[in-house]
Image: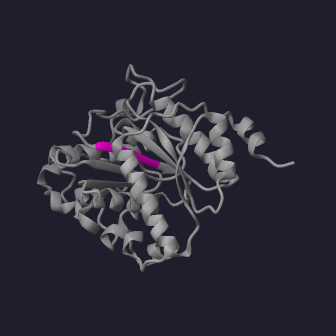
Amino acid sequence: MNMSVSTVPVTQLTNRSKRADGDGSVQVHMDPGAIGAAKVFAVYGKGGIGKSTTSSNLSAAFSKLGKRVLQIGCDPKHDSTFTLTKQLVPTVIDVLETVDFHSEELRPEDFVYEGYNGVMCVEAGGPPAGTGCGGYVVGQTVKLLKEHHLLEDTDVVIFDVLGDVVCGGFAAPLQHADRALVVTANDFDSIFAMNRIVAAIQAKSKNYPVRMGGVVANRSAGTDEIDRFNDAVGLNRVAHFPDLDAIRRSRLKKSTVFEMETSPELEAVQHEYMRLAAALYAGTEPQLAAPMKDREIFDFLGFD
């Protein structure tokens, strides 16, 4: 089958589905079929907040629980999995291009790479800037994984999604996920972005199984503003990772936190990741939040 990303049918870019995602919504609708029996998580948050660090360490924690894990990076810069694989692996788009987008010519080893402790890693990649829809790329990646039966023996799938959610394309992983996690710091910009992401998750939850799974506080000594916001809209904080230099250095060393030289502070971080992984795998109650309007949250988070 020819999976060209250069010419996407117009019907795929219009709201042709009867399952509209909201007023004025123009979405990329893809096969929303279940990803096998795996538990599927989508990790969102403001750009630069540490989603890839969080995703990779969470993948490592799941693997340490004995789970078969697949992490899918959904950012065109394809750096989601490099602390697991120790390299920038070729993207799905890269390898499809080498076979003129004839997916039947690919083998799993062409686009799936084994990382730390057996975590399987895929980087979806993306179209050149300004030329296509990243959500379409994510959909084609999932389709390719299904065609090669790579999801059938997987216990956990983690989508690591870039930046804020402002278009239907990058909300695409929500069509496959069971739970969405939002990573945030204890500051205005991060919480403002989280509020918009929660609104996107709520919109998708009207027609897909995805539900909000919780808030991960990251790179923050305190969580007072996060907790105040959570209380106001009906969310729960499910983990807290402080702003430790050892975590920053783990990225520089292309390593997960489980591979770094141990210290009492880092052991606490490792324990928090293991606790979070165990809780998520056991199953969490959906969080039914009521996100604020932009002006409302601006006033809520503002200072006199």
Identify which residue is drawn at 38% across, 42% down.
Answer: 173
In the image, residue 73 above or below residue 7: below
Residue 153 visible in this rendered orientation of the protein = yes
The x, y position of residue 258, in whole percent, is 38, 70
Identify which residue is drawn at 51% across, 25% down.
Answer: 22
* Residue 104 shown in magenta: no
Judge by depth and name the residue closer to the eye, 294 or 158.
158
The x, y position of residue 45, in whole percent, is 53, 51
Bounds of the magenta span? 39-43
Majority secondary structure in the magenta region:
strand
* Residue 42 shown in magenta: yes
Check the picture and name the quadrant holding the N terminus.
Answer: top left
In the image, residue 167 above or below residue 202: below
Quarter of the image where one finds residue 260: bottom left
Identify which residue is drawn at 54% across, 48% down.
Answer: 164
Return the residue found at the far top: 18
Judge by depth and name the residue closer to the eye, 72 or 266.
266
Judge by depth and name the residue closer to the eye, 234 or 140.
234
Quarter of the image where one finds residue 16: top left
Q: Is residue 227 left or right of residue 207?
A: right
Quarter of the image where one finds residue 244: bottom right
Judge by depth and name the residue closer to the eye, 28 or 36.
36
The x, y position of residue 57, in whole percent, is 40, 62
Tally of numbered discs: 0
Identify which residue is drawn at 53% across, 30% down.
Answer: 288
Residue 121 visible in this rendered orientation of the protein = no
